[in-house]
Image (tube, rainbow, N blue to C red):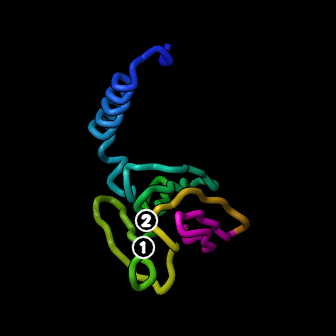
Amino acid sequence: MLANLDPVILARIQFAFTISFHIIFPAFTIGLASNFINFVKADGDVAFICTDEGLSTFNSEEWITYKKTDSGGENIFYKEGSSTKKSTSTGISHNFTIGVDFQGDDVWVATSYGLCKGTRTN
């Protein structure tokens, strides 16, 4: 059915779906680094969401977003309507995150600048 549709119509359908998602679920995206999602993976009760603006995690109570900065990294904690930022000396190699995997307590993050290894914080 979709194979016979014009590419312009398909683009309009995709746009309508995206806009409706942001209107219906705005609270869901408040702690998310970006609405451009590349990859999602769960480890236990924590969801890891790779976006074009960093890696976000959600454990049903708190969002944590990991970003690269010029001086290393930045962690943004969002819970119950308020956010706090914490600078770190290390961070992911680039904000454009492509994938994530786990090995024990280690977290491997694939970015557009290469692979990073970190330790779970939540």
Disc sitting over residue 41 in the figure? none
Give the residue at the far right of this rendering: 104
Q: In this rendering, is residue 5 above or below 37?
A: above
Rendering coords of residue 115 (x, y %): 62, 69
Residue beneath label 1, please? 75
Among numbered discs 1 and 2, the one appearing first in the sequence: 2
Residue at 36% x, 30% y is 11
Of residues 32 and 77, the one nearer the viewer is 32
Residue 96, horizontal then vertical, whole percent: 47, 62
Residue 91 highlighted magenta (yes or no): no
Between the C-alphas of marks 1 and 2, the distance is 6 Å
Q: Check if mark 1's residue and mark 2's residue have beta carbons within 8 Å.
A: yes
Please tell me whether mark 1 sits on a helix, a strand or a loop: strand
Q: Nearer the viewer, residue 9 or 74?
A: 9
Residues in magenta, as a range:
105-122
Above or below for 113 versus 12: below
Mark 2: few, some, or many residues within 10 Å (few <14, many ≥20)? many
Q: How many numbered callouts? A: 2
Q: Residue 14: which quarter of the image?
A: top left
Q: On the image, numbered disc 2 is attached to which residue? A: 65
Q: Residue at the spot x=67%, y=70% of the render? A: 106
Residue 28 appearing in the image: yes
Q: Position of residue 53 (x, y in %)?
A: 40, 61
Residue found 65% across the figure and 59% down from its top? 101
Say which amino acid is labelled 1. Answer: Asn
- For the C terminus, give its image quadrant: bottom right
Residue 121 drawn in magenta: yes
Q: Name the chief secondary structure element in magenta.
A: strand
